[in-house]
Amino acid sequence: MHFKETAPDWFEQLRTSICDTFEAIEDEHTGPFCERPAGRFERTAWERPEGGGGVMAVMKGRVFEKVGVNVSTVWGEFSDKFRGEIPGTTDDDGGFWACGVSLVAHMHSPLVPAVHMNTRHIVTANKAWFGGGADLNPPLPDDTDTSDFHGAFRDCCERHTCGDYPRFKEWADDYFFIKHRNVARGVGGIFYDYIDADDASYAFTRDVGETFRTIYPALIRRHMARQWTPDQREEQLIYRGRYAEFNLVYDRGTRFGLMTGGNTDAILMSLPPEAKWP
């Protein structure tokens, strides 16, 4: 699969571009906490003893309370118990190879939406595929933000033959649902998986990353200078508790990382720096 050569490089390029954009936002900020130093990403490389590794990039600044942009390329063997859950594995061959970029941003301002984005390429004995998506997680939803975010990814899907916005939107709505609370984690976005690896799906996956790189910074800049109230901050912290519940109970990426011996700090990077439960 030639994507084993090109996909890791692309994910690293996307990571670097997003980090540069987020640091530029920190530099230009003139709103709350602007008296603090602008944040910068700290990069920590890690190795997986069974094969591969990655780089965890985390920033805590004056706009971003905590943001992580991680890349990894790992390979090895699924356990006998776990391989049955993964397409393309067999009783005799539980080998896998996986690479991807994963991003979660939690903001100081409750008026700026939190966000998650992930794109990945996975290869097993009998299947190779791309997956990913992005979803918006505002503690205080804004209709214009929601419309613009969904519109950007609708346009992205429509540019590609394998892009199916209605299906991928519904997939996100179903996936990012906190069943034990009977509420959605956020306002959705797109989610897709198991799209057979070919030139078309690779181009679509790259466009998902590029679309995110364009639309999310625009939403940050729209709200980051606004003042917020203590009550709004309280709502944000309670919302974050629900976000944490989803990631610990339901998130497939968390489960995949832990079941394949990934870096625990990188896997749990998605958790908010502060949260409350009522």
Image (spheres, rainbow, N blue to C red):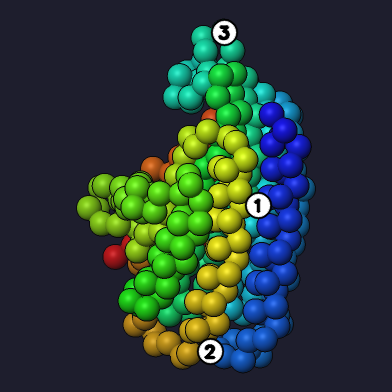
The amino acid marked with disc number 3 is Asp
Q: Residue at x 39, y 53 (%)?
A: 165
Which residue in the protein does label 2 denote?
225
The answer to whether any part of residue 238 appears in the image is: yes
200 and 142: which is toward the camera: 200
**Image: 173 above or below 277:** above
**Image: 53 above or below 172:** above
The answer to whether any part of residue 260 appears in the image is: no
Near mark 3 (Cα within 10 A), the count class, few <14, some 14-19 or many ≥20, is few
Q: Are marks 1 and 2 in contact (CB under 8 Å)?
A: no
List x then y, in percent, for residue 275: 43, 64
Q: Residue at x 71, y 50 (%)?
A: 10
Q: Which mark is residue 70?
A: 1
Image quadrant occupied by the N terminus: top right
Q: In terms of sequence position, does the residue under pointer 2 or pointer 3 come before the other?
A: 3
Q: Quadrant of residue 135?
A: bottom left
Residue 208 horizontal side relative to residue 47, left or right: left
Marks 3, 1: nearer the viewer: 3
Q: Residue furthest left?
A: 182
The amino acid marked with disc number 2 is Ala
Q: Quadrant of residue 276?
A: bottom left
Q: Which mark is residue 92?
A: 3
Q: Secondary structure at mark 1?
A: strand
Q: Secondary structure at mark 3?
A: loop
List x then y, in percent, for residue 37: 71, 82
Q: Residue at x 73, y 61 (%)?
A: 16
13 and 109: which is toward the camera: 13
List x then y, in percent, for residue 145: 41, 75
- In three-dimensional space, the C-alpha distance between marks 1 and 2, rounded to whole angstroms, equals 27 Å
Near mark 1 (Cα within 10 A), the count class, few <14, some 14-19 or many ≥20, is many
Q: In terms of sequence position, does the residue under pointer 1 or pointer 2 come before the other?
A: 1
